[in-house]
Every structure is written in C-alpha cells, then in structure tokens.
C-alpha cells in the first residue's frame, strides 16, 4: 500500500514527556503526521533511562519500554534553558501545525513558549496542553502521577474485590488513554482550523477525560444518590451471572466468562454437559441467576478449575458463550490472535539491536501506518536545522558546540 | 450557539451498549451530526441496562443511555430487512462516517459490510469496534467488555492480588478504550480522506488497543529480549515506596512519595518522625524493600486523618498524594464546578438531570453535551422526511410494516 497516509503534510512539535504526551505524538505519527519531539540532554527524560536496555547496554537511546511508547515520534534536541534554543523552537513552531505539551500549567509560559507568544509566530496554530487537572481551577497545580490521577475521578473507588478496599491499578492506565484521546482533540481542532482558518489552545484536563469512564456509576449517583463500591469483575450495571474470572488448571491461569443473555446461559449449561445444579428452573432467568450469583460463581469455578484456559474458552465459544483466556505478558507475544493481527513487531534499531514494539494498534484498510523504531535523541536535527530552518553549516555547528542544540 | 469543531461531518451510528455509542458521542459532542440508528423493537439494549430512577426499568429512563447518547438524533430502522437495508444505504450515501460494534459477519449478512457501503459512497469511513477485531482467530468469537479487558494482559499484569482473580476496573474500561481509539483513528481517516484517496474501514479491537498501548508499551520489549515478565502485586508499584493505596480515617488515599524531595515533604507532614529521617530511607528502592515495615507506620498516621486533609497537606509540601474519591466526592469537587465540567440537561422523561460535560475544552469551538439523548425514533420524521425526502404517507407505510 503506497497510498498517502491521512495526516501526511501535518507537522507537529511535541514537547510532551514521560508517557501521555509522547503517545499523542505517536498516534498522530502512525497516521502520517511528521512529529518532532523536542527534548534535551540537559534534562534527559526519565523514561529514557528505564531498564531493560537494548542489548543490555544502559544508554538513553536504548530503553526498550521508552522506545515502544515513543516510536512514531522523531527527536530534535534543544536545550530550552538557553534563549537561542527557545528562539529556534519558535522558528520551528512557525512551520508546524500543532504544538503538544504535558507540563504543568505555566511551564510553557516560563519557557517563553506560551500560547500568546506562539500564536504570534503562527496565527492558526493548534496548541494542545494536557495538565493533570486542566489549565484553570483550584486544583490546576495538583501533583499526581498517572497511576494515581484516577483516584481524583472516582474510578479507583470502583476497582477492587467486592466488599474490600480499592485495589490499585499498578501502572498509569490513564497515560496511553489520554494520549490517544488527546490525538482526537487535536484532530477536532485541525478540522475546525481547516474550515474556519482559526487555531486554538486546547485545555485538556486528564482528570476530566478519564472521569468519563465513571459515567455509568455517576449516573446512578446523579439519579439515585447511590455511591458505588469496588465490584470485582461483576457487570457494572446488569444483574448478570455468571460474570467474572474463573480459575483454570495451572499456575495463575484464568478464563473470563460473561453471561448477559439467557441464550448465553443455555450455551454455558450445554458446555458443562448440563449438570443438575445448572438445569434447575430457578437459574433459567437472569434474575434467578443474579439472586444466586455467589453460588453460581462457586459452581462454575469448581468446573473451570480442572480445564486448560485456552481449550475451555474455545469450547465455550463453540456453545456461543462469551469467554476468553486471561492473558499474562508472556502470553501476549505468543497468542495466535495477536500474532495474526501483527500487534507486536520486531524491528531493527539503527543502533544495531533488535527491539519488539507495537505497531498500528488500530487496523486501516486503505493506508498502512508508518511504524518507526524508538527515536534516537536528536535523530532529526540535521533535517530540521539545515533543511527546514535553513541554518548554515557553520551556524549549526556553533549551536551544537555551545550546547544550544543539545 | 457556535458551531462545534466537527460541524459538517455526518455520522450514522449502528451502535449498541457502550463502545460504538461512546465513539458516536465523542463525534456528536464536538459538533458532528450523529444519527443513531436503533432497531424498532426496543432499540439499543443500553436502554434496558439502567441505572433507572428508583430502580424502576423504563426504556426512556436509562442513565447509561442518557450518558452515552447526548447530542445525537435518533431514528429506528430494521436493517435486517431488505427495505431497511436500502434506506440505510441511502443514508450512508449522505454520510461521512458509519460507526458500528456488531459482531463481524453481522454487517455482511445484512448486506451492509464495508464493500457494500463503499459502493454507494467511496469516501465513507466505516469504524468497527469489537472486543477482538475483524481479523484473526478470535474475530468471530462472542465477547463483552470483560472478555476484552482480560485478554489484554492488563489485569494479569496490573490489577489484583497474587493468587486471586485479576480485576477489571469496575467500569466498561475496554469498551471506553476501544471507543476512544476508534474515534481518533476514524476521525483521522475522515480528515485525511482526500490525501489518502478515499474512505476506508477502520478496524478496532479494544483488547488489542489496550494490549499494545498500555501493557505492551512497558512490558513487551523487555520480555521479548530477556524472557522475563512481571505480574500484579496487589500493592501498587513494587519498585519504589511508598506507592500504594492506604486506608485513612474516612476512606483511602493514594500514598505516593518517590523522589527524595517528596519523601522529605511527607516526613514534614508527619512531623519528622525519627524513622523517616534514617539516611537509608532516602532511597525509594530501599524503602520498597522495607515496605512491610513502612506501610503500617504510615497507616498509623493516615488512620488519624481524613483524605482531604491528607491530600491538602501533602500537596502543600510537594508530595503527590491524592484522595481516593468516591463517585460522589469526585462529582462534587469545587475544582470541577469552577471549570464547568458538570452540566445539566433537560430530558422529557428524566427531567433536569446532571451529566458529565465535555472531556476536553476547545475554546474556539466548544463541545460537550447540549441536547439530551433521543427517545426511540424521535427524529424519524425529520431524518426520513427532510434528509431522504420520504413522504409522510410512505413513512406511515414503513411504520406499519415495522421497517421503521
């Protein structure tokens, strides 16, 4: 497929760091935009130092997790502590459509790269800011990590075993979620710009975007004043049973089973070869099963425990039951479904090691996403400073020597 | 009322439950004209999922449907019948996007798969969102949010106690994630269709989106190279401490203090107890190795204080501790009120009801819910009459025949 990608011709300066901001750039990069991450050796992004490293060599250009999360972004090194670097950044932004940043409110202004300053150099600019709790309001300067941001949305209060305390999600689910939704926000603003000629500064509060996932529980609060508690793997709204994760043969092996309809229940009963307990008439209806959910779960678990998770999922599917194995990290790489979809791919990094990253996590029939390796620091400097900004070789070398380009 | 950012885009939504409707909502709340197509016999099953006021089921009073379908126009159409299919194709001719979340094969059976849609409108973008996607060995599987989430690796890796069941978030986390990925890639396909030479089929597996971007990103490279992988601990972040949820006087707090400045800030908040000033505890890794000793000591203190007080004091000292808000506490935050995140909508059956507002703010082209979710078939006359030019007599016949 040699067709042009949808976002070809769109250029983006990405000041995003750590995870959420880089994923915004990555997504738009997969779709064809030229994304230039602005970073510096003066303050190396902490995720560039996360082990393990390609070939085991500790180096900011070889962090395997950093590469997977950042692939799709290019890299330009500018030491923004220096005024000349800020001037070069503005010259670059004048040739960009979009600026992305995920610092706290006010940081870009402090770098003389705030919205008012940038719209002066690029009047129809789309600027995208994604602080934790937005650009305004009493909590705008809140300090959070992505993994705890969810606690301020009510989401964490829903996660855990029934009757127990909230159990943490042990990484920042909100970072890639916001990274992807952030790209949607930018596309909305680009569509508006193309139609009206007007750019804008997007105020993306990660808290508010994530809180949308609390919508179903929020409605119960808004209508009934009811406050939800951790619900395990139960259906968030329906009295559906069984609905959970059940043990299988082997160490930490599980199968998920979600029975929402009576037809799915009949399929499950058939897959279990119709044991007496399951054919009892009081279990034929959703309401009857829901009333006896603990008992139903216990009996289903007793049945699943002797089976291989994958064989059991396939057998349940043959009976029309929504069931799937619960995969661990190792399973992801070996799973026939993800292999068939090319979810994870091994690529050769220019620094001479192989790395496994993810490619287009959404499949498109006409255009094939650009998949690049994780960016080397400054890999796009030559292109940006000489081709795009037209610096003379001499000036370019000077700026490198004085650690402006650094 | 100024136009939303996506003014000029028309979308048809053949969506049910959560994923495609939330994708459609993102388009509708930012200004696209989204026409939701529901089956005449009962409509979107989310109408039956609740929550309902007073727990009394009513197809026009479902809170989930209210939340997911703001700003849309609603029509009924039986697309499984040839006449319904033809009407859908007539609508698709005038649309930019079709959003759907049926099991693969269903659209083909109705004569409405991508090839059929592209024949009448080559510039059309078809967005399909399913747990497993359109291709691969699990494509034809039956699946719900729960199955997709647990197939992604997210729960095994990141949520639950060792030896106990891995956990979903307690919402439709995979459906929401897939919907967001679909909205982004789908809108890009619309935005760039001239550059790309036409419309296309955008195939989202919500399990895959999470497996790749959330779980794969930070785990798969290391596992592929070194053959080592991690599992959930039930505690928080095992590499540094404190990084866990602790109980407090009136609930829970997310206790996080990793960098030296944060740890020393936390010590100040606690009144600089001797144990926190031990030199070896300056290192978050050493603290993590001694988490069994440290967490109970911190808990003694948190149990004496409320979640807001803990959050305020910690934040004032540069420590990124946050309260674990209940849904009620989250909804009543002064911060969200000042930012206008919560809105109120008038609904004929539900009255004036609160709703979550726009997920992000576009100052030049404001978005967010403005019009309550449509009643079943509310816009039939408007859409069939004005958009397709169907006469009143013809519409009455379609109604009588059960097509509309």
Image (cartoon, coloured by chain):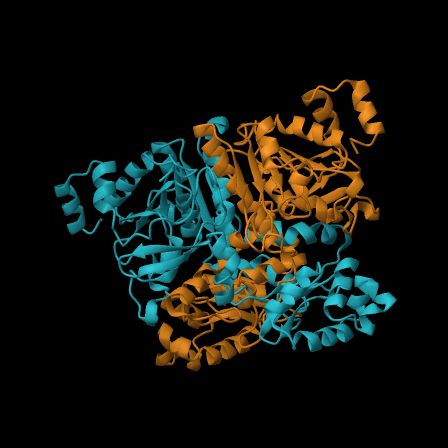
Chain colours: A orange, B cyan
Residue that sits furthest to the left in the current view: B393
Q: x, y (%) of residue A18?
A: 69, 47
Can see residue B12? yes
Q: x, y (%) of residue B394?
A: 15, 42
Q: Nearer the viewer, residue B175 or A378?
A: A378
Q: For this view, does B314 lie left or right of residue B170? A: right
Q: Nearer the viewer, residue B113 or B272?
A: B272
Residue that sits furthest to the right in the current view: B279
Q: x, y (%) of residue A130?
A: 59, 46
Q: Quadrant of the N terminus of chain B?
A: top left
Q: For this view, does A210 lie left or right of residue A405? A: left
Instruction: Check the image and report above or below for A267 versus B203.
Output: below
Can see residue B103? no
- Which residue does the image show at 36% across and 32% down from the upper left? B121
Instruction: Check the image and report above or below for B391 versus A338.
Output: above
Instruction: Check the image and report above or below for B146 versus A66.
Output: below
Q: Which quadrant of the view contains residue A183?
A: top right
Q: Nearer the viewer, residue B154 or B297?
A: B297
Q: Nearer the viewer, residue A315 or A343?
A: A343
């Amino acid at each position: 497929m040699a067709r042009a990608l949808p976002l070809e011709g769109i250029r983006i300066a990405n000041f995003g760091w750590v995870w959420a901001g880089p994923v915004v750039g990555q997504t738009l990069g997969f779709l064809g935009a030229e994304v230039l991450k602005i970073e510096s050796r003066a303050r190396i992004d902490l995720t560039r130092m996360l082990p393990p490293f390609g070939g085991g060599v500790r180096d900011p250009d070889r962090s395997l997790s950093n590469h997977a999360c950042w692939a799709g972004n290019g890299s330009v090194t500018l030491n923004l502590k220096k005024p000349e670097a800020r001037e070069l950044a503005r010259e670059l932004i004048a040739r960009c459509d979009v600026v992305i940043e995920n610092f706290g409110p006010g940081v870009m202004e402090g770098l003389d790269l705030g919205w008012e300053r940038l719209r002066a150099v690029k009047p129809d600019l789309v600027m995208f800011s994604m602080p934790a709790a937005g650009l305004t309001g009493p909590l705008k300067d809140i300090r959070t990590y992505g993994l705890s941001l969810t606690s301020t949305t009510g989401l964490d209060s829903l996660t855990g075993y029934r009757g127990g305390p909230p159990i943490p999600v042990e990484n920042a689910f909100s970072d890639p979620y916001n990274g992807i939704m952030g790209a949607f926000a930018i596309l909305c603003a680009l569509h508006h710009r193309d139609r009206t000629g007007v750019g804008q500064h997007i105020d993306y509060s990660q808290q508010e975007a994530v809180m949308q996932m609390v919508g179903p529980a929020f409605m119960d609060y808004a209508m009934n004043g009811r406050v939800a508690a951790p619900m395990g793997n139960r259906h968030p709204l329906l009295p559906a049973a069984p609905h959970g994760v059940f043990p299988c043969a082997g160490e930490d092996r599980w199968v998920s089973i979600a029975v929402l309809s009576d037809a799915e229940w009949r399929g499950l009963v058939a897959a279990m070869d119709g044991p007496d307990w399951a054919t009892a008439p009081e279990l034929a209806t959703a309401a009857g099963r829901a009333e006896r959910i603990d008992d139903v779960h216990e009996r289903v678990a007793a049945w699943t425990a002797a089976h291989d998770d994958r064989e059991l999922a396939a057998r349940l599917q043959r009976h029309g039951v929504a069931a799937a194995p619960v995969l661990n990290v190792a399973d992801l790489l070996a799973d026939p479904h993800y292999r068939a979809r090319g979810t994870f791919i091994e690529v050769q990094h220019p620094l001479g090691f192989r790395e496994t990253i993810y490619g287009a996590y959404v499949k498109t029939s006409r255009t094939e996403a650009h998949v690049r390796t994780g960016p080397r620091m400054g890999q796009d400097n030559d292109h940006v400073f000489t081709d795009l900004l037209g610096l003379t070789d001499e000036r370019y070398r000077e700026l490198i020597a004085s650690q402006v380009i650094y | 009322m100024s136009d939303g950012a996506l003014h000029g885009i028309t979308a048809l939504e053949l969506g049910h439950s959560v994923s495609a409707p939330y994708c459609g909502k993102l388009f509708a709340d930012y200004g696209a004209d989204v026409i939701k197509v529901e089956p005449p016999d009962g409509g979107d099953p989310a109408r039956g999922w609740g929550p309902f006021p007073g727990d009394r089921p009513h197809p026009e009073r479902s809170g989930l449907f209210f939340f997911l379908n703001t700003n849309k126009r609603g029509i009924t159409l039986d697309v499984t019948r040839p006449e319904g299919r033809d009407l859908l194709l007539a609508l698709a001719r005038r649309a930019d996007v079709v959003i759907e979340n049926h099991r693969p094969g269903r659209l083909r059976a109705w004569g409405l798969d991508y090839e059929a849609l592209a024949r009448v409108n080559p510039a059309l973008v078809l967005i399909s969102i399913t747990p497993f996607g359109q291709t691969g060995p699990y494509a034809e599987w039956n699946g719900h949010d729960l199955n997709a989430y647990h197939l992604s690796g997210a729960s095994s890796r990141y949520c639950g106690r060792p030896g106990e069941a891995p956990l979903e978030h307690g919402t439709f986390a995979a459906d929401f994630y897939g919907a967001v990925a679909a909205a982004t890639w789908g809108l890009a396909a619309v935005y760039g269709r001239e550059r790309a030479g036409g419309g296309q089929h955008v195939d989202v597996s919500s399990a895959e989106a999470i497996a790749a971007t959330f779980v794969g990103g930070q785990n798969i490279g290391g596992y592929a190279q070194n053959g080592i992988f991690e599992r959930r601990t039930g505690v928080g972040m095992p590499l540094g401490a404190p990084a866990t949820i602790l109980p407090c006087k009136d609930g829970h707090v997310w206790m996080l203090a990793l960098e030296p400045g944060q740890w020393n800030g936390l010590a100040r908040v606690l009144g600089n107890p001797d144990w926190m000033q031990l030199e070896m505890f300056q290192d978050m890794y050493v603290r993590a190795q001694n988490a069994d000793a440290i967490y109970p000591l911190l808990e003694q203190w948190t149990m004496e204080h409320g979640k807001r007080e803990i959050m305020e004091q910690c934040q004032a000292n540069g420590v990124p501790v946050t309260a674990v808000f209940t849904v009620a506490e989250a909804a009543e935050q002064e911060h969200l009120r000042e930012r206008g995140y919560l809105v109120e909508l008038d609904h004929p059956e539900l009255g004036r009801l609160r709703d979550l507002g726009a997920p992000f703010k576009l100052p030049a082209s404001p978005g967010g819910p403005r019009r309550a979710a449509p009643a079943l078939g509310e816009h039939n006359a408007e859409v069939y009459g004005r958009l397709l030019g169907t006469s009143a007599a013809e519409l009455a016949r379609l109604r009588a025949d059960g097509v509309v």
